[in-house]
Image: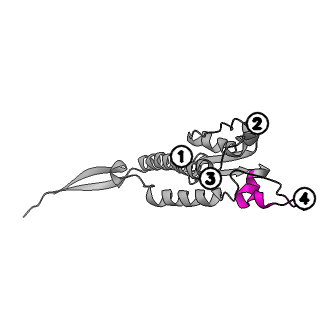
C-alpha cells in the first residue's frame, strides 16, 4: 500500500522576525515615553515660568510629544533655562540591537527640590517666615508616578509581533 502526504512546515524567517521586533519595540518605546511624559511633566509638574516642565523637552522631542510650556502671564519666560537643564536619551536598538530604553535627567535645582520636598515648609530662621510661597508646592513625586505609569503600560500594552508575520510555510510532499 502506498500513501501520499503533504505536510506544511513552518519556518521562522529570522530577518522578518528581527525587522518586526524592531518596529514593534520602537513603536512601544515611543508610546511608553509619551505615557511617562503624560504622567510626569503634564500630570505632576506645574507651569509658572515654564522652566521645570521644559526640562522634559529633550525627551518629548524624541517621542513626538507636545508639551504645554507657556508661562503664566505674571511669570518671566524661563523655558530656555529648563531646556538647558534637561537631558534625555532614546535608544531604539540603534547602538545595541538588544537595548530599547529612554532616560530623562535634570540639573534644574528648584525642580529637584520640589520633587522631594514642599519648599513652602522651608523657614527662614532669621524671620520665622517661609522662604517660598508656592502655589503648587511639592513633593511632586513625578518620578514615582512616571515609573508606575510606565510599568502599567509595559505590563498591559506591549505585545510582541504575531507569528503570522514571521513564519514562512513550506509544503513538503512525501510518497
3 or 4: tag closer to the N-terminus? 3
Furthest residue toward bottom: 1
Element on which disc 3 rests:
helix
Q: CA distance from mark 1 to mark 2?
A: 32 Å
Q: CA distance from mark 1 to mark 3?
A: 20 Å
Q: Residue tagged by mark 2?
A: 76
1 or 3: tag closer to the N-terminus? 1
How far from the left and from the top, in percent, is residue 55?
70, 45
Q: CA distance from mark 1 to mark 4?
A: 49 Å
Q: Which quadrant, please, contains the C terminus?
A: bottom left
Part of the protein shown in magenta: 111-129
How far from the left and from the top, in percent, is residue 11?
34, 54
Q: Are marks 1 and 2 in contact (CB under 8 Å)?
A: no
Element on which disc 4 rests:
loop
1 or 4: tag closer to the N-terminus? 1
Q: CA distance from mark 3 to mark 2?
A: 21 Å
Amino acid at each position: 500500500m502506498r500513501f501520499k502526504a503533504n505536510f506544511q512546515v513552518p519556518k521562522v524567517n529570522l530577518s522578518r522576525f528581527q525587522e518586526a521586533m524592531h518596529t514593534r519595540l520602537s513603536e512601544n518605546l515611543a508610546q511608553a515615553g509619551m505615557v511617562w511624559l503624560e504622567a510626569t511633566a503634564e500630570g505632576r509638574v506645574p507651569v509658572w515660568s515654564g522652566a521645570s516642565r521644559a526640562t522634559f523637552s529633550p525627551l518629548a522631542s524624541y517621542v513626538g510629544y507636545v508639551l504645554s510650556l507657556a508661562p503664566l502671564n505674571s511669570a518671566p519666560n524661563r523655558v530656555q533655562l529648563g531646556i538647558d537643564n534637561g537631558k534625555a536619551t532614546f535608544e531604539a536598538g540603534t547602538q545595541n540591537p538588544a537595548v530599547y530604553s529612554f532616560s530623562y535627567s535634570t540639573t534644574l535645582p528648584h525642580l529637584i527640590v520640589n520633587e522631594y520636598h514642599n519648599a513652602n515648609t522651608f523657614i527662614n530662621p532669621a524671620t520665622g517666615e517661609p522662604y517660598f510661597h508656592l502655589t503648587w508646592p511639592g513633593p511632586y513625586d513625578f518620578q514615582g508616578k512616571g515609573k508606575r505609569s510606565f510599568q502599567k503600560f509595559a505590563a498591559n500594552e506591549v505585545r510582541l509581533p504575531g507569528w503570522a508575520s514571521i513564519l514562512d510555510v513550506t509544503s513538503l510532499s512525501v510518497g
